[in-house]
Image (spheres, rainbow, N blue to C red):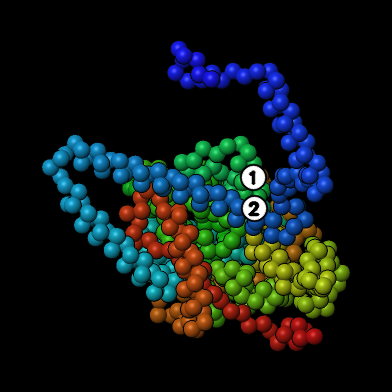
Amino acid sequence: MKRPKLKKASKRMTCHKRYKIQKKVREHHRKLRKEAKKQGRKKPRKDPGVPNSAPFKEALLREAELRKQRLEELKQQQKLDRQKEQEKKRKLETNPGVKASNLEPVNEEFGQRKAKNKAKAGKQNPKKLYCQELKKVIEASDVVLEVLDARDPLGCRCPQVEEAIVQGGQKKLVLVLNKSDLVPKENLENWLNYLKKELPTVVFRASTNLKDKGKIIKHLKLKKRAPFKNEVCVGKEGLWKLLRSFQETYSKAIRVGVIGFPNVGKSSIINSLKQERICNVGVSMGLTRCMQVVTLDKQITVIDSPSCIVSPLNSASTLALRSPASIEMVKPVEAASAILSQADARQVVLKFTVPDFKNPLEFFTLLAQRRGLHQKGGSPNVEGAAKLMWSEWTGASLGYYCHPPTSWTPSPHFNEGIMTDMKQGFNLEELEKNNAHSIHSIRGPRSARSILFQSSGLTNGIIEEKDIPEELPRQKEKQQEEGEDHNDLDSDQESVDEEADEESLAMVPAEETWALPEEFQAGMCL
């Protein structure tokens, strides 16, 4: 009942009514608990994460981290778009004479031009785009760093690219032996003595535990980041001094291009020099799809390049190790078998802790049983074991090494005059001291714990677009589907300076095929 002097009724109630309500609530909660007990109450479990014994753990963690980065970059892009819209509105408010209709045609033209560029990128063969970007890097560089994997330095050299650098005029070529912590010290010294006779060579080990550019990374996030083991960079001072000495003799600002085959660590070297994770790096092949300019200081600028294209005329093991195709795009058993044919079987058995095997198929069966890779019904997953071996061999954790040739012979595209010209302008005595210090500070594995690998020699690459073989219709359909997926991902990762990088087009890893030797095909047909 309303009180006469108040506008609304009071919320006070009698104790009898309040206690009655509390009793009803208790009974209701008791009833819910009883029903939950009958049904078997399931407590929400925390995500246990990926177990250490799971295969491809590094790849799963990296995919989750990349997904988080894409979401953060998408939010940042949306925030910047909102800020741009607000600035446009403010300009219209401050300058009422400028109409919105005047701005719309400009935006429409820009959108149409961007759509045309994307359409051209979709129609054009991605391998041709790789060739175009690689040529741009070589033409714009004064010094070219050819990055070699220290586990197989000769297999990482491309004679076609080196010949293009020599024909490009007054350009210097320097070899960088990256991943030098994965080979024994004696083998590293032998390769250094072999390569420095021809070109200036730098011993290097890139650091991969770096902070992202322009982002504040929390402690927990940094802990989950990238499963890399290299934290300290080795050889950075030697490379810096070498470039600085050449810049002083050149007496003006220089541009340094970084080239090489997939997964040799081109972007990791740039990040180590910049001391920032400015270039995208990862275990998977072919992450860099277009040239990227990074300013180290006022006098030195570094240009990151996409990977060199491997010619299909190379051996099966070379194609398996140097091709940017992912494991899912090719037959993993054939690729892993080609690699296994070049490795020392006894050391492979010791490294992977499996019994002796007669053929590759038996090895993959034993490896699948050892790592717990099974299909439905309990049969060993041979293809999964081949993928696992291939990912470890092309990654940055497995230690294997090759012996340099017994007798030194210069490359066919070099002569004494060219080699002396390449060494001019560099302080080679100081470089030799820095290399000795780098080798001393690196803790390489023992020869007994590494796998001896038989190198296939120089890897032929493709520079000219006309030399790229025509693709089959099925390959084109697959690449178009993959191109759409990559375009969706790239649209999430567009940066603020997107307008300036319109000409840089996204690249899709190309599909390659391998031909196994007859002896392995016969061994696999059981």
Please tell me which residue is depicted at 48% across the width and 78% down the height of the picture.
476
Q: Residue furthest left?
A: 97
**The quarter of the displayed image where residue 117 is located:** bottom left
Depth check: give the residue in front, 459 or 71.
71
Please tell me whether residue 138 is drawn above or below residue 522 in the rendered image.
Answer: above
Left or right side of 265 for 364: right
Disc 2 secondary structure class: helix
Can the viewer see residue 495?
yes
Image coordinates of residue 145 in percent, x first then y, are 48, 58
- Give me the residue at 33% from left, 65% from top: 115
- Which of the two discs, 2 and 1, labels the residue nearer the N terminus? 2
**Cα–Cα gap, marks 2 and 1:** 8 Å
Determine which of the numbered discs, if any, sits on residue 61 in the image.
Answer: 2
Instruction: Give the class, few, some or many, for how many residues have Cα within 10 Å of label 1's Cα (few <14, many ≥20).
Output: few
Which image quarter is the C terminus in?
A: bottom right
Question: Type of residue at label 1?
Answer: Lys
Say whether marks 2 and 1 touch (CB < 8 Å): yes
Residue 101: where, in percent of width, then height?
Answer: 18, 52
Q: Which labelled disc corresponds to residue 224? A: 1
Q: Residue 217, located in which quarter of the rendered image?
A: top right
The local secondary structure at tag 1 comes to helix
Residue 202 in sight from this viewpoint = no
The residue that appears at 20% across and 41% down in the rendered structure is 92
Q: Is residue 326 above or below residue 513?
A: above
**Residue 119 image-quadrant placement:** bottom left
- Left or right: residue 362 compared with residue 318: right
- Give the residue type that dot 2 points to: Leu
List x then y, in percent, for residue 184: 71, 56
Pick the front one: 470 or 131: 470
